[in-house]
Image: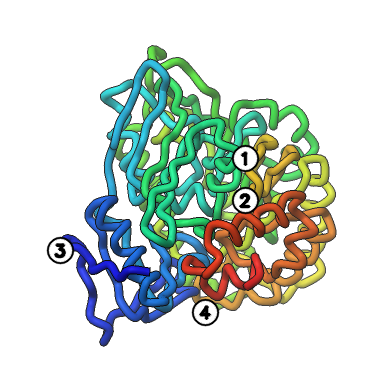
Amino acid sequence: MKRVDPSPDIRRGPVKGRSWQNWARTVRVRPQRIQVPASVASLQRAVAGAAAEGLRVKAVGAGHSFTGIAEAPDVLLDLSRLQGLVSADPGTGRVTLLAGTRLHAVPRLLAPYALAMPNLGDIDRQSIAGAVSTGTHGTGAGFGGLSTQVCGLVLIQPDGGRLSLPEGDPLLPAAALGLGALGIIAEVTLQCVPAFLLRAEERSESLETVVSGLADRVEADHFEFYWFPHTGRAATKTNTRLPASSPPAPLPPLRRWVDDSLLSNTVFRATCAAGSAIPAMVPAVNRVAAAALGGREYTDRSSRVFTQDRTVRFREMEYAVPAQNLPSAFAGLQQLVADNPHWRISFPVEVRWAAADDRWLSTAYGRDTAYIAVHRYYREDPGEYFAAFEALMLAHGGRPHWGKEHSLGAAGLAERYPLFGRFVRLRDELDPDRVFTNAYLDRVLGP
């Protein structure tokens, strides 16, 4: 293969002293080189040049995956300069974004066209390519994850060529949630919707009341709840979609700052640190937190309601179970916590829902899904808690989130995804020399 020299608009970082780590501080790597392409053409040249040298290539966005999915021992492609809107069609709602575009920037880019993404997760720091590639999702039993919004992709192949996958292409359901294993995403086309508002109702409630009424609650447009371990309380969030012409009633700036910045970040960080040093105080702190959160209603732009600014660093494991298995799986988790009184879990457990979809490696492939996510403060050892939780979720038909911690390998995952073998064969076809692999992908897909 002909060697391709990097273009002038690629910055090649020096080997010495240059390292990369993810947001959660669970992965650290020192690549042979770091390159920052400033255009799709320079991205193509960077990939082809690395492949010609026999080097592996991985792209990174915001580094918000907890796993090593973006770890790049050879060539790390930082897509932070590949941000922005390529095109938008208000008539069809189709919007094409450069791969490195951060989710928090998308509402501003869509505002002139009166469009919005149909659903979002609760964090918007990720890049659009990273979010769809790892299965990022929000909540809402009638809505799919972010990858279901993808109606077109441009993938850069090992030789630097462009592989365009428009809507209807039989490979799009594989590549839209491709783990970075099928190529480097350069552009993402999303099917957006007319801009809308959300009416948010947030409550502190008895956990028993919440669990007993789940069948009715998940009928809402978007519902989720947070259980505070060592307590019988939960914080609930119910969001109802409203037309953009509806009268807004946003939170006053001071109330928003107190709730979402001071309490949810500054104070919570302090209590997590204190709980890590003095575990015995965690149950009492959780009781106070569970009572303090909630008790507010407001109506605002969808992106301002879906997402939160989270600055407290943590580690996370999340499993997707068939929606009908949620009650049993959640009851099992409650029992696990009760049976291990030495655990002191300061982070709440998050429970969400999603509709079945057709993305080959989606955690919601072929089945309506409920998600249970557990967290630990990043200075605490999550090992025993996560291992017990994982075993419980696997017993309930669980599939792990690709971007969050889990221990499964290719053999175990193949049993849980009907099209797993088909995806691996497609990978063999598109990347036979494994230009786009790393240790994580070797583990979950096979070498």
Q: What is the number of the mark on residue 224?
A: 1
In the displayed structure image, the side of residue 58 where residue 349 appears, left or right:
right
- Please name the residue that numbered disc 2 is placed on: 350
| Camera-side residue of 8 and 432 | 432
The residue under label 3 is 8
Mark 1 vs mark 2: which is more N-terminal?
Answer: 1
Q: Amino acid at mark 2?
A: Glu
Contact check, label 1 and label 2, Cβ < 8 Å: yes
> Is residue 56 shown left or right of residue 47?
right
Mark 1 or 3: in front is: 3
Q: Secondary structure at mark 3?
A: loop
Distance, label 2 to label 3, CA atoms, is 46 Å
The vertical placement of 426 against 274, above or below, is above
Q: Looking at the image, is mark 3 or mark 4 earlier in the sequence? A: 3
Which residue bears the numbered disc 4?
277
Dividing the picture into quadrants, the one containing residue 205 is top right
Q: Position of residue 281 (x, y in %)?
A: 59, 70
Say which of marks 3 and 4 sits in front: 3
Is any atom of residue 271 visible in this view? no
